[in-house]
Amino acid sequence: MDNKKYRILLVDDEIDVLEFVGYNLRREGYDVYTAQDGKSALEKAREVMPHLTLLDVMMPTMDGMETCEELRKIPGAKDSIIVFLTARGEDYSQIAGFESGADDYVTKPVKPKVLISRIKALLRRQGTLENQEQPSGQIESEGLVIDKDRYVVITDKEEVTLPKKEFELLSLLSSKPNKVFTREEIFDKIWGDDVIVGDRTIDVHVRKIREKIGLENIKTVKGVGYKFETGK
């Protein structure tokens, strides 16, 4: 897809950042929209439905974490890519970012070429996934139904909606019950080997899946990866 067809929402309370990063993105051919706080970002996201959102953490009115969670609730925009672009580089801040639903976390300062490269990799990966034939049907195991056609997880007759990456991770693990997927395999299939994510990313996503659907089937294989365990 041509860069001009991609809409990027840039959210930061610093005008200098909006101008500098926005200039570099527009120079690459992206359509760039800006907002200076979380509330304005949500309004703009509903209006333009961005393919990718660059989001600061520390902002007035509504911080980046809360904004990310609310972005994931917007119909039609919940599957767009969300990247935190922030000076907060602590491990706990990055983990909180992924827990709120982010796809990637970039620490300021970052060179424009590096940021553009990261964005291209994320959009390329997203485009590849969308163009691939998606797995269809349902996986049923011990009261759990993973509906790949509707992107819905059903447990105890209750439907649970997961963010796209969490759903993709659960679908991957459950596609081959009892098979151990290495961390490298998971990174490659869900995030792509040209996208840099933190070492704790998979752990955070697995923990969120377990919390949301009370799933005990996902087992940790220490030092290797994860598997979806069944009695069958």
Image (tube, rainbow, N blue to C red):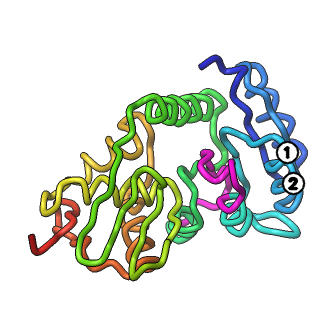
| Residue under label 1 | 47
Q: Residue at x 51, y 36 (%)?
A: 126
Quarter residue 62 falls in: bottom right
Describe the element under mark 2 as helix, strand or loop. Answer: helix
Query: Residue 52: which quarter of the image?
Result: top right
Relative to residue 15, is residue 97 depicted above or below?
below
Q: Which amino acid does label 2 sit on?
A: Glu
Q: Which of 37 and 218 is in front in this view?
A: 218
Q: How crowded is mark 2: few (under 14 residues within 10 Å), some or many (20 or more)?
A: few
Exactly how many numbered labels are in the figure? 2
Residue pictured at 81% horizontal, 63% vertical: 59
Q: Dot 1, how many residues are within 10 Å of its Cα: few (below 14), some (14-19), or many (20+)?
A: few
Which residue type carries mark 1?
A: Glu
Q: Quadrant of the C terminus?
A: bottom left
Whether residue 84 sits left or right of residue 207 in the image: it is: right
Task: State the residue at coordinates (74%, 28%).
Answer: 25
Residue range (magenta)? 72-90
- Expressed as whole percent of the image width and height from the top left, the position of residue 230 reads 15, 71
Q: Name the residue under label 2.
A: 43
**Does residue 86 show up magenta in the picture?**
yes
| In this picture, residue 136 sits left or right of residue 85 | left
Classify 229 as above or below 121.
Answer: below
Structural distance between the alpha carbons of marks 2 and 1: 6 Å
Residue that appears at 78% across and 24% down: 26
Is residue 84 on the magenta stretch? yes
* Residue 170 lies in quadrant: bottom left
Q: Position of residue 81 (x, y in %)?
A: 60, 45
